[in-house]
Image (cartoon, rainbow, N blue to C red):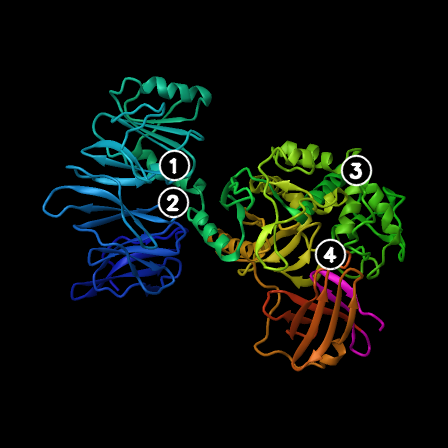
């Protein structure tokens, strides 16, 4: 199909839209995959032109017979928007994906004005009026205003409507310069002799997306030098100048014809990688009933953050980049990092017994002297991993020591080192090892050895520190109505800090830690090396030294972790080879599904692949003797009752038996995938049956990452 327009790349760049000639004066919008060359029609015509992508790449605006329409990029019916008289020129979507800016001419006149059209339909908003012609316009990076030109003069107008104005860097109203962006990065001063179109050129837009500031200014403007000098004084050496301008301190000359391609490519590599993600987050929070979300993306060694929603439904306080969420078990990565620091300093060895450092460590049913540091990093200690502690162990500096002493009375679920069972208790023991070797309480060890050196000031543990921050609270469903509301409790007891019960952080600081971790490639590679293959769960097939091991759909290695506290969930995925990481912090149970959607989206956009399911499912369930799986599996705090039922298993899962009252039992339908793996119908979870005896009856079930021994009765 012949293209009669330049292809318009979608955000991410792989798919592009173009106008195709259907013959007989008919046109339509087609899509092309620039990687494979595959093409497909998006619209059917007969007179479709001017495709324009939404920021998240999910929709395309286009003209059909002079009227603006919007169509899903995946295909479907095109929705016509409000009709406007005269010729229409679509410009661009707002950064949040809610509006499309257009220019519309007045029939019989030379006038042309700026309008905003709601992308979902509704009344049009006219932003300019009068006897003049708007030539071009562009959205500000924040989406709160549009800059436009009339006869070479620059103006701006609020997106919400209102009188137009000109702006200078000092707030002065002017018709001779235009100030783009916020002063938070390098500055490009573009000096010109005469009238100039105020809309940023492509290389300038790339710089703005990368955090630059662009000042377009007339050379005869008297106050430019003083205004710019005030900015340069703060950060000398960060100014680039184009045109005949005074010599700014530390400025580097910039010639667009010569330097623009190089500078534009430099800027694109550092640009905000997912411009439509904020709009996507708003959609997902509504879909999954999650009040608020904060997402961090590490790409090309730069961290960008995206937020949506509220931190607290009761107060309505919005989530911002500096909102702290509880990161849950992602704290285990901090614990593992501290252990590996101490190993690198020669203060411990991974294969030495824990009792070498904690001689008081005892177990009821096993020799504690056989439990090594490596066992605990890899969740292979075998003792009860979710021991809730007895009584209130307090906030004193001895709370970890008091908890470790209580482990002398807990059950052993499997022999030391033989199986894998996720263990919060084991991580608390490692946290106490850190305290013993550093002479610091666990939270201070994290602060002094990790958070402060990397500038991650929001990684906090104590309520008196957290209360000074903009903190998200957990939300849980009401047991009677199912309606999501603020959880009654905010923090759990502090003794489980090393396993992740009370830690908070911003998304940015989680990724500061990841960047720091990847900055020592030798240590990172050692920690990412598989120590044990695990019963697959949530995309994870193995465990390293603290890190969950995953694989992308294209075969590349990925690592990560997750976390859950009272109504707050976190998910972290890292692709070391690509230098890409994404963390999703949420404040309601729906955050699990939301986090998976966001992670898949970000990884596909930045790496071309998502995390693969480690289980290969057959076309048809295998035929098995299901009666041998029947029975009760008892992990002290979690139990699973299983009966054979037709071509699958009927099961009842009871969790958190230490709670008063415990949550209601969950009925499960288990469908066989292999002799040892069953999928939980309607979910992405698995139940595994392990270590079959001579009679074929399994000795253990693995549920939610926990080992449950088969009961004798």
Q: Do the residues labelled 4 and 3 touch (CB within 8 Å)?
A: no
Depth check: 498 or 86 in front?
86
113 horizontally vs 672: left or right: left
Q: Residue 435 carries which label?
A: 3
Residue at which label 2 appears: 95
User: Spatial distance from mark 4 to mark 3, Cα to Cα?
Assistant: 22 Å
Mark 2 or mark 4, which is nearer the start of the sequence? 2
Residue at which label 1 appears: 208
For the point 60% across and 33% down, which residue is it? Answer: 455
Queried whether the magenta region covers residue 126, the answer comes back as: no
Q: Do the residues labelled 3 and 2 touch (CB within 8 Å)?
A: no
Q: Are marks 2 and 1 in contact (CB under 8 Å)?
A: no
Frontmost of labels 3 and 2 is 2
User: Spatial distance from mark 4 to mark 2, Cα to Cα?
Assistant: 42 Å
Mark 3 or mark 1, which is nearer the start of the sequence? 1
Depth check: 503 or 692 in front?
503
Q: How many labels does the image show?
A: 4
Residue 470 picture quarter: top right
Where's the N terminus, which quadrant? Answer: bottom left
Q: Which mark is residue 422?
A: 4
Depth check: 189 or 288 in front?
288
Q: Is residue 649 above or below residue 76?
A: below
The part of the chain drawn in magenta is: 693-713
Mark 1 or mark 4, which is nearer the start of the sequence? 1
For the point 83% across and 49% down, which residue is it? Answer: 390
SS under mark 2: loop
Where's the C terminus, which quadrant? Answer: bottom right
């Amino acid at each position: 199909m012949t293209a009669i327009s330049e292809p318009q790349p979608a955000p991410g760049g792989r798919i592009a839209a173009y106008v195709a000639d259907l013959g007989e004066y008919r046109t339509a919008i087609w899509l092309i995959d620039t990687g494979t060359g595959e093409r497909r029609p998006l619209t059917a015509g007969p007179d479709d032109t001017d495709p324009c992508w939404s920021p998240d790449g999910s929709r395309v605006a286009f003209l059909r017979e002079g009227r603006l329409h919007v169509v899903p990029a995946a295909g479907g019916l095109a929705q016509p928007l409000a009709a406007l008289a005269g010729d229409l020129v679509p410009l661009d979507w707002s950064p949040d994906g809610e509006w499309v800016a257009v220019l519309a001419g007045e029939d019989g006149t030379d006038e042309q004005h700026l309008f905003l059209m709601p992308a979902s339909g509704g009344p049009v908003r006219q932003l300019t009026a009068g006897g003049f012609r708007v030539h071009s316009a562009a959205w500000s990076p924040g989406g709160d205003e549009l800059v436009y030109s009339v006869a070479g003069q620059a103006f701006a107008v609020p997106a919400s409507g209102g009188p137009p104005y000109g702006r200078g860097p000092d707030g002065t109203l002017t018709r001779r310069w235009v100030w783009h962006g916020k002063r938070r990065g390098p500055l490009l001063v573009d000096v010109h002799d005469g009238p100039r179109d105020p809309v940023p050129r492509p290389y300038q837009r790339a710089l703005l997306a990368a955090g630059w500031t662009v000042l377009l200014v007339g050379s005869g403007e008297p106050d430019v030098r003083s205004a710019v000098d005030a900015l340069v004084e703060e950060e000398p050496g960060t100014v680039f100048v184009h045109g005949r301008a005074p010599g700014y301190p530390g400025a580097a000359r910039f010639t667009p014809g010569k330097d623009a391609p190089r500078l534009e490519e430099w800027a694109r590599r550092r640009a905000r990688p997912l411009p439509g993600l904020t709009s996507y987050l708003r959609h997902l929070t509504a879909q999954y009933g999650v009040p608020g979300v904060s997402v961090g993306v590490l790409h090309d060694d730069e961290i960008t953050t995206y937020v949506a929603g509220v931190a607290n439904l009761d107060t309505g306080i919005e989530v911002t980049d500096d909102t702290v969420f509880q990161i849950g078990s992602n704290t285990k990565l901090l614990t593992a990092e501290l252990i590996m620091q101490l190993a690198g300093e020669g203060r411990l060895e991974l294969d030495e017994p824990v009792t070498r450092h904690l001689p008081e460590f005892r177990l009821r049913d096993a020799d504690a002297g056989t439990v090594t540091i490596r066992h605990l990093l890899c969740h292979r200690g075998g003792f009860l991993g979710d021991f809730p502690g007895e009584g209130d162990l307090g906030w004193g500096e001895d709370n970890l020591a008091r908890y470790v002493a209580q482990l002398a009375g807990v059950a052993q679920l499997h022999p030391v080192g033989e199986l894998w069972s996720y263990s919060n208790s084991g991580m608390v023991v490692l946290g106490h090892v850190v305290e013993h070797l550093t002479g610091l309480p666990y939270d201070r060890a994290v602060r002094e050895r990790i958070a402060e050196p990397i500038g991650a000031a929001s990684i906090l543990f104590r309520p008196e520190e957290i209360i000074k921050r903009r903190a998200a609270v957990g939300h849980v469903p009401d047991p009677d109505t199912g309606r999501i509301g603020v959880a009654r409790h905010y923090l759990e007891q502090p003794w489980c800090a090393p396993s992740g019960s009370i830690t908070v952080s911003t998304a940015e600081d989680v990724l500061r830690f990841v960047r720091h971790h990847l900055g020592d490639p030798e240590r990172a590679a050692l920690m990412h090396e598989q120590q044990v293959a695990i019963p697959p769960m949530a995309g994870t097939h193995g465990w390293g030294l603290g890190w969950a091991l995953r694989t992308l759909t294209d075969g590349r290695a990925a690592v990560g972790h997750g976390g859950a506290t009272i109504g707050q969930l976190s998910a972290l995925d890292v692709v070391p080879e690509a230098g890409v990481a994404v963390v999703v912090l949420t404040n309601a149970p729906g955050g699990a599904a939301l986090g998976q959607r966001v992670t898949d989206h970000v990884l596909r956009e930045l790496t071309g692949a998502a995390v693969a399911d480690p289980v290969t499912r057959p076309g048809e369930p295998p035929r098995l003797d299901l009666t041998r799986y029947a029975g009760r599996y008892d992990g002290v705090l979690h139990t699973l009752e299983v009966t054979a039922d037709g071509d699958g298993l009927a099961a009842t899962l009871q969790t958190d038996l230490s709670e008063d009252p415990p949550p209601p039992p969950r009925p499960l339908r288990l469908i066989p995938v292999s002799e040892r793996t069953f999928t939980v119908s309607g979910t992405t979870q698995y139940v595994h049956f392990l270590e079959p005896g001579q009679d074929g009856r399994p000795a253990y079930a693995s549920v939610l990452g926990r080992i449950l021994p088969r009961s004798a009765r």
